[in-house]
Amino acid sequence: MKKIYSWFFLTLCLYCGCKKQERDITSLEKIESIAVNPMNSLTVTLNDLYSDCAFIKLETVSESLLSGVNSLYVFNNRIYIYNNRNGGGIYCFDMQGKYLYKIANIGQGPGETTFMMDFCIDESNDRMWIADNYMKILKYDLNGHFIQEYKTDFAIHNIEYLPGSDDLLVIRFGYYEDKNYEVGVYSLASKQLLNHKDYASKFEQIVGGSHTMFPYRNNLVYAFGFTNTVFYIDAKGIHPQYALDFGKCKVPENLLKEMDNKNLVVELNKPSNNYAGLISRCIETDEYITFHYSFRNENRISVYSKQSGVEKSLEKVMIDNQAQPVSDFLLTHTDSCYYSVIYPHNLLQTTAGKAEIESAANYGVYKNLDALRSVLKEDDNPVIVCGKSNLQALFYSK
C-alpha cells in the first residue's frame, strides 16, 4: 500500500517526553520570512515541474517488491529506496532500473534490524548509515555489506550524515528517556549529543514519517512539524534560516501545548479549521526552497523562488487527465535533477497493462509516457521520474 503523508495516516510510535529547553534558538536571530498561502494551491502538470524528464521503470522481481517509497536517495549512478514494509528494507537499483541488492535483515543480532526507520549515505566515504528502532545505528558499505553497529540510548525517526565531518550524524529523535529532544548533532566517536533543539509539541515526538534533512552546500537543511522554521545544521549548532508564515492557517500554539494527541489530531483534521503544518522534506537549491506540508488533512508542496521572493503551493499534479498525489513529487534532489515517484495503478487506464510483458522489458528508461505504459503492469514497482527543473514555469503568467 502506498504511503500517504498526512496527519491521519502517519506512523505513530507511542513515546513522548517533556523537558524545558535551555535556549530558544528560534527567537535569537532575525531570519527571512516566507509567506505560505495554502488557500490558493495550484494544480500543475509534469511540464510545470520538469523541462525534460525520463521515467525509470524499476525491475520487479520477488526480491525487489516495493509497496511504497518512504525515502529516496540517488548517488553515484545508483538509486537507493527505503520501504517500511515488513520491518523495513533498503533496495538498490542502477540508473537503468535494474535491481542490484537489498538490506533487509530482520532480527536483533549484529547487522540486523527489528524495524528500520531511515537511512542516509555518506558520499565522501562511500558508506551508509541505517537507523533501527531498537536503539542502534548500523554502518554498511554501498554494496550492501555490514561493517559495524553502534548502540544508542534513544530511538530514531530520521538520520543524516553531516557534510564535511568525520563521525557526526544529525538525528531526529523518537523516544529519549524523559527528554523532549527533537533534533541534534550526535558524535559516534564520543557517543555524545553536541547540541539539540526541542519539539514544539508532544505530538511531533510520536510522529514518524518522511525524510526531514537534505544537504545544501556545507549544511543540512532541516524542517519538521509545527515549528514553522527552516534550520541550517552544521557542526557548530542548529541555526534558524527561514521563518514559514502560514498566516491565518497557522496551528495555534495553545492547541499544540495543551491538547492531548488524540484530540489534537481531531482538530488538525477538521477542514473548517484550515490548519496547515507538519512540515517535512525541505530541499534547498540555489534557486528554490521546496517542502511538503499538510493542509486540511491533505498533502501540499510549497515552492519558493529565492529570486522573486514568491511562494506557490501545489495541490495536484496532472498526468494526462489523471490527478497524481502531490506527496509523491519532488522527493529529493541531486545536481540539477529532481526526483519523483509515480505508481503504476495511477498511470494505467482500466484496459491498459494487462498483456504479458517480456522479461527484457522488466526495467529500463523511457522518454515518454506512451512508451512506458506499453511495458507497465499494475503490480509493477513504482516508476522513478527524474529530470531538470522547470519550476520557473510556476512564477510567470501563462
Image (cartoon, helix red, strand yellow):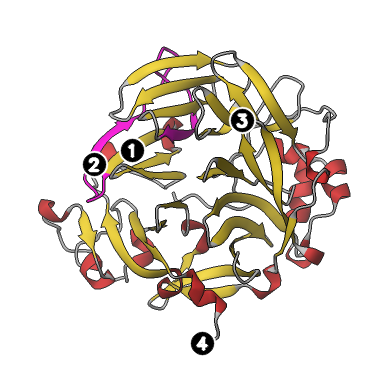
Numbered label attached to residue 234: none
> The residue tagged with tag 2: helix, strand or loop?
strand
Q: Check the image and report above or below for 42 versus 27.
A: below
Tell me the kind of residue under disc 3: Ala
The residue at the point 75 percent across, 62 percent down is 246
* Local secondary structure at mark 4: loop
Question: What residue type is disc 4 on?
Answer: Lys
Residue 323 on image: x %, y %: 46, 71
| Tag 3 residue | 235
Q: Disc 2 versus disc 3: distance between alpha carbons?
A: 36 Å
Magenta segment boundaries in residue numbering: 94-122
Q: Earlier in the sequence, mark 4 or mark 3?
A: 3
Q: CA distance from mark 1 to mark 2?
A: 8 Å
Mark on residue 91? 1
Q: Residue at x 20, y 67 (%)?
A: 374
Query: In the image, 353: left or right of 215?
Result: left
- Position of 338 with respect to 240 (left or right) is left
Residue 266 image offset from top left, x and y in percent: 75, 52
